[in-house]
Each structure stands twice: as structure tokens, then as C-alpha cells.
Amino acid sequence: MEKSFLIKPMLDEIYPVIDYGKGVYLYDMEGKKYLDAASGAVTANIGHGVLEIIEAMEEQAKKVSFVYRSQFTSEAAEKLAKKIADWMPGDLNWSFFVNSGSEATETAMKMAIQYWQEQGILTKTKVLSRWVSYHGITLGALSMSGHTGRRARFVPLLEDFPVINPPYCYRCPYNLEAPACGYACANELEMAIKRIGADQIAAFIAEPVIGAAGGAIAPPKDYFKTIKKICEDNNILFIADEVMTGFGRTGTVLACEQWDVIPDIVAFGKGMGAGYAPIAAAVASEKVMAPILAGTKSVMSGHTLSANPQSCAVSLAVLEYLEKNVIIKEVESKGIFLKNQLEKLKEQFSFIGDVRGKGLLLGIEFVEDQETKTPFPRKAFITQKVVRIAMEKGLLVYPAGAGIDGVNGDAIIISPPLTITEKEIENLLLLVKETLAAFSNQINA
Ligand code: PLP
């Protein structure tokens, strides 16, 4: 192979070159077939190569691909904003379009700060968050991210926004079980607010189901109700980072709907364009927009490619595809089936500690000992080994958790396209079993 000048995650590794994708499968140039059980990075929610999306792309490209948001709006952006407002619970009506999940969480953060500034309150600038979280790679988003691995190099540039424990029931720091625990981890927020001062805090941000940092950690039933109440009681906005969970991944448009909570601001990304175009959004409620509309009438953010008509047309086509094919409704039953089957593997493989998640955002945590939940040593690079074996077998899974030194264990996420069929789920399970059997042989060798 010729020398590559493309900066990839590992510069000393050779990456397969993908030729094309169809449905849940990707095919490389050597003809090898991969079942994309991760939807890339929990992104390709409707699978690869969907004709309707390609047609929508072409149709928009023939009209216009770019207009500058400070000069013009476009039919595609207007229709997409309207569709999102129609789909959202409550009055989450206002969309600010950006190009990545990191930009979406940063925009949400800026909207929250601006909400208070427009009311003459200039001290509320912190956006508190949890440990074992990931909100993006740009410095503002990383400041909110409780991902020690990704923070490490940039600590001097970051704010100390992660302040509380996550609802990581498998490794509960209180050694309690929900609901008897009284949601002690959520109540840590109340204590953090008291310590820091509500007058300093604009918002609290959380992923409804913790993705990359933890490996599909879903909260117990009333966790988010407790969080929302603490936010309301202390005059703090609640931002849901639905970059990974949004638009159906857990079986509802917003994952927050699973726990009857409506955020003040939501960040979307990934599944919004389903990988067909870079598009993301910060979506704000009427409450958040009211002082801005009455004040400066402008949200202080924006990128050259914000509300790009090409990306908006793609996202609109993705949402219409989800709607037309009634895809989100089937996610819950598919997820339950897949999760139950994965649970059964615990008997066969003693290194499976926990199987968890919601809808089609599922996680497996690996442990040295099922009884004691002892994690593998960090330096054993278990997640990386499993991901690599899976890839050799033609199965793509998403690495998670392992970046958090000492806090939690090795995990993978299984998050196939929401369009996956029963037969394809069976095939996925076969490949998972083959992967884990090969891994078992490797660690027992
Ligand atoms: N928020 C969450 C929950 C994510 O999972 C991610 C990406 O993994 C981001 C934000 C950042 O999104 P992006 O990688 O598109 O910048």
C-alpha cells in the first residue's frame, strides 16, 4: 500500500479501506463483509446505502448546496426545524443547526449562559456535569466531559465541570440498589450546587444513557426526575446530551422521554444525519428562548456551515425515513430481544460482568471475576482486544469505558442500525459468540 498522509487514530496501524455499505453491512476493498453492530459510532441509525437519502442529497445538490446563514435561510433548514419542533415533547421548538455533536453541546452550553445573561445575571456561567461522561472533543465540550482519558492532555485548559458520580448501578459507590438508594448519586448534585453556589451555575448537562465513557449505562427509573427537580429547585437549566441517544436509539425520539423528563435544551448529533451528512443541533425550549427573543434576538454562536442546506436536506430525509417506515416503534422489542440473548452469554463466558442499556444502545462490561466484579487490569487492554477480534470475525462493536482510568471497567457498545432485521440480529449474536469464544481462548491460553 502507498504511504498514507491521512492522520488516523493510530498512526502505526493499517486500516481496511471500505468500498461500500448496504443495510447493516460494510464491505472493504478486499471483499470482506462486516456486520456494523456499532452503527459506526452509534451513528448509521438507518443503515448504509439507503436510496431515499441519496436521492434527497442529489435533489438538494441540484438546487443549492450552500447558503450563508447570516444572509439567507433555506427551505431544507426551515422544514427540518419545523419537523424537529413537531417531534419534540413539550415546547422544545427552537433549533440551532451545527455540524457535530461537540458543537451541539457547546452551543447548548452557550445558550444556557446567554439565557441568564439576557436577564442581567452575569455570574451563572458554569455547566456542571458528571464523571464517566462524554460531551465532545472541543475544549468547551471537553470541559463538561467527565472522561479522564480524553481530558488528561488538556487539563490546564479545562474547567472543572464534572462534579458528581454517574448512576453506575453495577458499581454503585454507595453499595446500594435503586430505588432504596434514594438516588444518592443524583442527590450529589444538590450538594455540589450548595458548595459551588447556584448563582455561579447556568446548567447541568447529562447523557440520558452514558455512551462512550461508560458503555451504555442507563439510569434507574426516577434518576432523571430527581435531577430535573434539583435543577428546577435551584434555578439551573437542564441540558440533555442526546447526541448518541436522540432520534430513536432507545425507542423514543428523546431518550429522556423514557423517564418522563423534558429538558430545557437538547443536543443532537450522530443519528440526526445518520452518517449521510455532518449535522447536529442544539434545540431550546420556549422558556430558554423567551429572554433571548425579548433581548438581543440573536444566539451568540454559529459556524460557516451551520444550517447547511445540503446537510439539512439529508437530515430531513432521515427523519422522514424513520417516520415512513415506523422504525422507532420497533426499537424497544428488538432491544429487549437482543439484550436477553446477550444476558444468556453470561453463563457461558465468566468474563461478562454486566449486560445493560436501553433500546438498541446496549453495553457489555468485562470483568476478571463475575462474583467480585473485579475489573481486568487497565494495561491488559481488554476492550481493544475484543474489538480487534470482533473485527477479524467481521463484526463491528464500539469500544467504551476503558478510557476512564481506574473508575470503571472495559466495555463494548452494541448498537446496530435501528433497521436491523430479526435474521440479522441472529447473525449478530452468532458473531458475538464467536468473538467471545476466541477472546476466551486468548485469555486462557
Ligand atoms: N455527546 C455524546 C453523548 C457523544 O457520544 C459524542 C460523540 O461520541 C459527542 C457528544 C460528540 O460528538 P462529535 O463526535 O460528533 O463531536
Image (tube, helix red, strand yellow):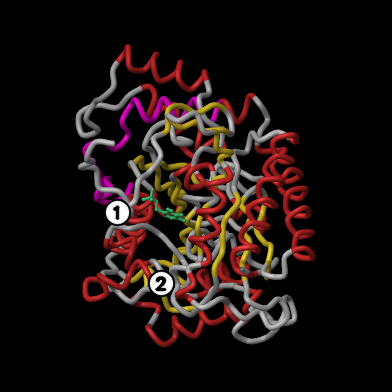
Residue identifier under label 2: 128
Is residue 32 highlighted in magenta?
no
Q: Is residue 189 above or below residue 94?
A: below
Name the spot of residue 187 as percent of width and height, x first.
57, 80
Q: Quadrant of the N terminus?
A: top left
Q: Which numbered marker is on residue 376?
A: none
Q: Report which quarter residue 350 is drawn in.
A: bottom right
> Closest to the observer: 101 or 427?
427
Residue positioned 58% across, 45% down in the render = 393
> Closest to the observer: 279 or 31?
31
| Range covered by the magenta-colored residues | 292-320
Task: Tell me: is circle 2 under 8 Å from ligand 1.
Answer: no
Residue positioned 48% across, 78% down in the render = 164
Residue type at numbered disc 2 = Leu
Residue type at numbered disc 1 = Asp
> How many discs mark residues in the rendered view?
2
Q: Is residue 100 above or below residue 2?
A: below
Residue identifier under label 1: 12
Q: Report which quarter residue 348 is drawn in.
A: bottom right
Residue contact at pointers 1 and 2, CB within 8 angstroms: no
Element type at marker 1? Answer: loop
- Callout 1 crowding tier (Cα within 10 Å): few <14, some 14–19, many ≥20: few
Tell me if residue 89 can be seen.
no
Residue positioned 65% across, 64% down in the render = 440
